[in-house]
Amino acid sequence: MNKARIKDLRTARGWSQERLAEVSGVAVRTIQRLEAGNDASLETLSMVANALEVPVRDLFVSVDSDQLTIAVDGLDARIADERRARARAERAQKGWRYFYVALGIAVTAGAIIAVGSPASTGEAILVVPAYWLGGLFLLRFLEKSVLGPRLDARYPLTAGDRHGSSSGDVK
């Protein structure tokens, strides 16, 4: 039997069992069972560890079984890989947003310069709201239909179902 530290970690954050269950995506009864020392799947432990922002290993005072030690270490490595992949995907999305803003600033500056010229009738200023509104809708569409799937293909751990099948029960 492995002594769990979940209650200590939860109370250190000032969270109730209900709050931890909500953030981790598991049932309150599951949290109660974990805190009572009952066994759980590695995937459940992974979800709780993610919610508490700690490695799975830190959920226990000690890990008794060598087989469990290997499984927990593998799960911690997979979670670390997932976080790195998610960070790379977020950086890529942020880069596209920065490009959109930089181009928008250039379009706005160009429109202001065009409106300020003596030959202008002032209609060029309409390009500014058209760019910002139309560009925002276009950017959201492209993020969902083009950029998102490409990032998911390049960094597969960032895909919607990050918690594949269960890896077994912790004994």
Image (spheres, rainbow, N blue to C red):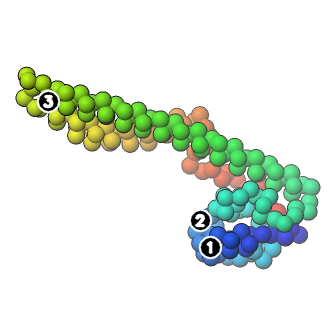
Residue type at mark 3? Val
- Within 10 Å of the Cα at label 2, are there few (<14), some (14-19), or many (20+) other Cα atoms? few
- Residue 152 visible at all: no
Image mark for residue 23? 2
Which image quadrant is residue 151 in? top right
- Count of picture labels: 3
10 relative position to 57: left or right: left
- Residue 22 visible at all: yes
- Within 10 Å of the Cα at label 3, are there few (<14), some (14-19), or many (20+) other Cα atoms? some
Comparing labels 2 and 1, the label whose residue is closer to the camera: 1
- Within 10 Å of the Cα at label 1, are there few (<14), some (14-19), or many (20+) other Cα atoms? some
Image mark for residue 115? 3
- The quadrant the N terminus occupies is bottom right
Comparing labels 3 and 1, the label whose residue is closer to the camera: 3
C-alpha separation, residue under disc 3 versus residue under disc 2: 51 Å
34 relative position to 86: left or right: right
C-alpha separation, residue under disc 2 versus residue under disc 1: 10 Å
From this view, report whether residue 91 is shown above or below residue 32.
Answer: above
In the image, residue 84 lies at what x, y percent?
65, 42
Residue type at mark 1? Trp
Q: Which residue is mark 1?
A: 15
Tell me if label 2 and label 1 are in contact, CB under 8 Å. yes
Residue at horizontal 37 percent and vertical 33 percent from the top: 102
- The quadrant the C terminus occupies is bottom right
Residue type at mark 2? Val
Residue at horizontal 68 percent and vertical 71 percent from the top: 12
